[in-house]
Image (cartoon, grey):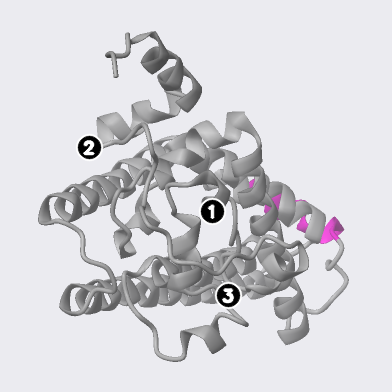
Amino acid sequence: MSAAENTHNSDGLLFNEELFGLAILAFIVLLIFEKIKPYRSFSNKINKESFVTNTTAFLINNLILTVLRASSLFLVAQQFSSYGLLADLDNGLVKWLLAFAFFDLAIYIWHVASHKFEFLWRFHKVHHSDKSFNVSTGFRFHVFDLLLEIIYKSVFVVVIGVDAYLVLSIEIIELFFIFFHHANLRITNEEAISQVIITPSLHRTHHSTLRTEHDSNYGIVLSVWDRIFGTRKELVPEHIGLDLIEAENFIQLFSLAFITEIKVRQLLGWIPKGRK
């Protein structure tokens, strides 16, 4: 590797560290604001369980991913990024915007698949099991969900043809928006803003207890994909979380992936009903 490439990679890593720092700062600021003036009130018990479980999931998941060296998937993908669709474009604004749009669309598609395919849903539903809706919900994921998504993103890097550090930069920006649209806040001029990006009101619908409602608004940053593919819904959900099963701590959260709603319904069906 040349000195110029070393400098380029060092600058990229430094920029990503700064972006990540800003994303975490945004998390803290949003957390403070939603504590001061929440859009929706949840009981102290639900809020506490939600925050503790979600932050624990974040810490343990990152520890597991570090031990498994999951980030090496990006490094492997980077070796083949020069063969993708955008490989011949110079690293600049045009390439960044195209990469961002493709990446956001790719995550939209992955999100839809996570709802439509039972194997993926069994892991993704962990994210939907939160009975609260707050900025820490953006941390609530099953580690297998994250691992599968990392593999998917690595394939994306190869197909699209952008350096892994650029994808990492885009992903950190998407992390900021994940914090933003999970925030339990009422946003000024939200209806107008939601025409361009995913806002808390749109994503709140995505966390509805009713599957007919939460199978919608799959976008992460841009709201255009839901309009194009007809998955946009604008409504206020009556209840948040899953209907039959829930997780109150990290152990239950991890185990939730191996319990299906169908099995729970079958078990409930075996319980004798009382006479009316």
In this picture, which residue range is highlighted in magenta?
Answer: 75-84
> Quadrant location of the N terminus?
bottom right
Q: How would you classify the magenta stretch by its main secondary structure?
A: helix
Q: Which residue was labeled with disc 2?
A: 249
Where does the image place residue 142, in percent across and percent down from the top left? 42, 39
Say whether residue 157 is left or right of residue 31.
right
Q: Is residue 225 magenta?
A: no
Position of residue 275 relative to residue 115, above or below, is: above
Q: The residue tagged with tag 2: helix, strand or loop?
A: loop
**Which label number is shown at residue 213?**
1
Of callouts 1 and 3, the N-terminal one: 3
> Quadrant location of the C terminus?
top left
Q: Say few, some or many: other residues with alpha carbon within 10 Å of mark 2 (under 14 / 14 to 19 / 20 or more).
A: some
Of callouts 1 and 2, the N-terminal one: 1
Q: Say few, some or many: other residues with alpha carbon within 10 Å of mark 1 (under 14 / 14 to 19 / 20 or more).
A: many
Q: Residue furthest front?
A: 276
What is the CA distance from the residue labelled 1 to the residue labelled 3?
48 Å
Give the amino acid type for the residue marked by disc 3 in the picture.
Thr
Where does the image place residue 41, in percent across and percent down from the top left? 21, 65
Position of residue 122 relative to residue 40, above or below, is: above
Residue at image point 60% right, 30% down:
118
Say whether residue 213 is left or right of residue 82.
left
Q: Which residue was labeled with disc 3?
A: 7
**Which label number is shown at residue 146?**
none
Where does the image place residue 220, in percent across and percent down from the top left? 56, 65
Q: Nearer the viewer, residue 96 or 188?
A: 188
Mark in front: 1 vs 3:
1
Q: The residue tagged with tag 3: helix, strand or loop?
A: helix
Asked if one can make out residue 70 in the rendered structure from this viewpoint, the answer is: no
Of callouts 2 and 3, the N-terminal one: 3
